[in-house]
Image (cartoon, coloured by chain):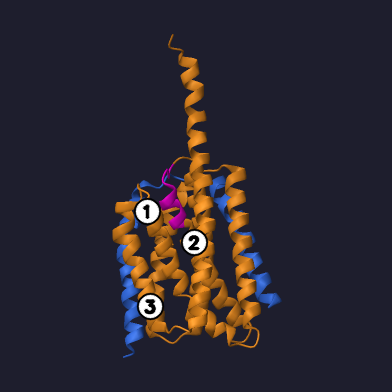
Chain colours: A blue, B orange
Amino acid sequence: MDWLKLGYAALVIGLIIFIFPAVKYWQKNSPKAKLDDWLAFLLPIGLVSILVIGLIWLI
Amino acid sequence: MDNPRLHASSAPRASALSANKVLRNTYALLSATLIFSALMAMVSTILNVGHGTSLACSVAALLLVWFVLPRTANSAAGIGVVFAFTGLLGFGLGPILNHYLNMAYGSEVIATSMGGTAIIFLGLSAYALITQRDFSFLGGFLFAGLIVVLLASLAGIFLNMPGLWLAINAAVILIFSGFILFDTSRIINGGVTNYIIATTSIYLSIYNIFIALLHLLGFASND
């Protein structure tokens, strides 16, 4: 087994352990969203997707 | 004489002024750390450092943000920690940048990724600032998505599946774009009052979007 792969796997496991308290906190404490909140989120994310597809097409 | 109307109107104004100050300090520190990080990336590219050094830098950066930053974030030492953290991550970019620089259109791929990341960051920040909307409802969704992406990355390290890596990189761009909205709105709405923590969060979003975009564009240019 490549030691570098094991090192990267250990780093990813470390990241999961590091962010886990934040995951638990935000799962419990995220405010409830309405439909227009999600639409306000999906609009810029949709534009980001179009930009990325455009860049892939350009390169 | 105590005037309740004065208090009622000055409290939100004081809060808005405080949020503006955090935002201004965050963007100033973010600009400085991005320049420093880019310089460190340039140095590591010139030195042609290996993947082992890159991994060691990432581990050291994780340890800094995990154990040192929470203890120093409320003092001037926190600024030094943020520079060390961003410098280490920038230095760790050397092998990836050298890989793309050795490709036929590698420098174009790197420049396009940088430009794309800048457009995404500036556009999303402007959107969050103009709309003043509270995106804190995204917290649970974004962190759950991040856990899924990290678990998929763990599988991807051992499974040689290019399709999986493409999907992971696309998801990373969308999740960290969401984090830019989330972090910026938390600063505007007073959820984050420490500009050192805010800078670290936004830097990580920019860093991850840049790397994911680099991999996607590298793949698209027949890497």
Residue A9's spot in the image, x, y percent?
A: 34, 78
Chain of residue at mark 3: B
Asked if residue B196 is among those painted magenta in the image, a careful observer would answer: yes
Question: Label 1: which residue?
Answer: B78
Q: Which residues are magenta?
A: B191-201
Residue at 50% from the left image edge and 64% from the top image edge: B36
Residue B31's spot in the image, x, y percent?
A: 54, 57
Where is the C terminus of chain A found, in terms of image quarters?
Answer: bottom right
Task: Say if residue B174 shows up in the picture.
Answer: no
Where is the N terminus of chain A found, in terms of image quarters?
Answer: bottom left
In this rendering, position of residue B56 left or right of residue B25? left
Question: Label 3: which residue?
Answer: B55
Give the CA separation, mark 3 to mark 1: 23 Å
Asked if residue B198 is among those painted magenta in the image, a careful observer would answer: yes
Q: Amino acid at mark 3?
A: Leu
> What secondary structure is the stretch in magenta mostly built from?
helix
Question: Label 2: which residue?
Answer: B205
